[in-house]
Image (spheres, rainbow, N blue to C red):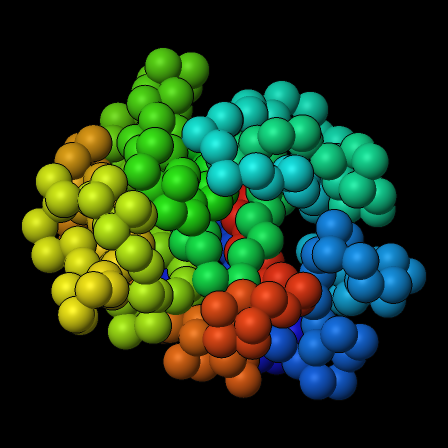
Amino acid sequence: MKNIYSFRNLSQESGCIHLVTTKNIEYDYNFSLALHTNEEPKSILQNRDKIQQKFPNMKFIVANQTHSDHISIITDVTSRGWDSIDSAIDDCDALITNQKGVMLTILTADCVPILLFDTKQKVISAIHAGWRGTEQQIVIKTIKKMEQEFNSNPKDILAGIAPSIGRCCYEVDWGVAQHFQEYDNAFDRVEDKYMLDLPHINRLQLIKVGVREKNIELSSICTACEVDNYFSYRKEKVCSGRFMSMIGMT
């Protein structure tokens, strides 16, 4: 599959597979992979089948993301939410598993997707962090859950922060920005607006919970700036497409 994004750190790990999809005009809806945004389901399923063909032995897990701090641990090697939205993990924004043959997925169009891999305990996670999830410290809670359930050590975890809207384009009001005052350099003030840096804040949260700074890789890609390659809710003014970030183990 062409036109994908991948992380250098995760790519070097044997048994860990991952990718971030991009737009592709050769497919319906520019290769959107979301079933929940009212596109023709048949076309979206055909797009998803292109991913399935690349990883024919994997079972895919899709969550019904709600900007929460809810975390689900996947214990069965069974697809959820892949062929039908009805079977998706309900009300969940972070997935964790130690099962091989399972691909955890996140759908976004500006929010921050984060992929984690515990290199020692062999545990993976996929996290959806919009401003609400970031404010609720979902990435910290997810790593603590990995510690509790799988004896993970944050120092052994690799993290990839995938393409998302950057501080260059993410304008918010004080009602949102005020939640992130504790973080160094979290936003720039421009008159009565604030340019919020969610990837940076999530990076700081990863460091706070014990992930080594050298183990954190940022894409440094702004979805609004690179709207030709990534769906952007802000830039496209309420677009319905979503790209997918995913991680699994073989």
Residue 58 locus on image (x, y percent): 70, 45
Single out the residue that lies furthest toward the top.
148
* Position above or below: 2 against 111: below
* Position above or below: 129 against 97: below
Residue 223 locus on image (x, y percent): 44, 72
Single out the residue that lies furthest toward the front.
192
Point 62% across, 76% down: residue: 23
**Quarter residue 233 falls in:** bottom right
Residue 35 appears left or right of 175: right
- Quarter of the image for the C terminus: give it: top right
Residue 77 visible somewhere in the drawing:
yes
- Quarter of the image for the N terminus: give it: bottom right
Residue 97 visible somewhere in the drawing:
no
**Quarter residue 178 falls in:** top left
Point 75% across, 40% down: residue: 81
In this view of the protein, which residue sits in the foreground, 10 or 106? 106
Residue 37 locus on image (x, y percent): 73, 56
In this view of the protein, which residue sits in the foreground, 60 or 235? 235
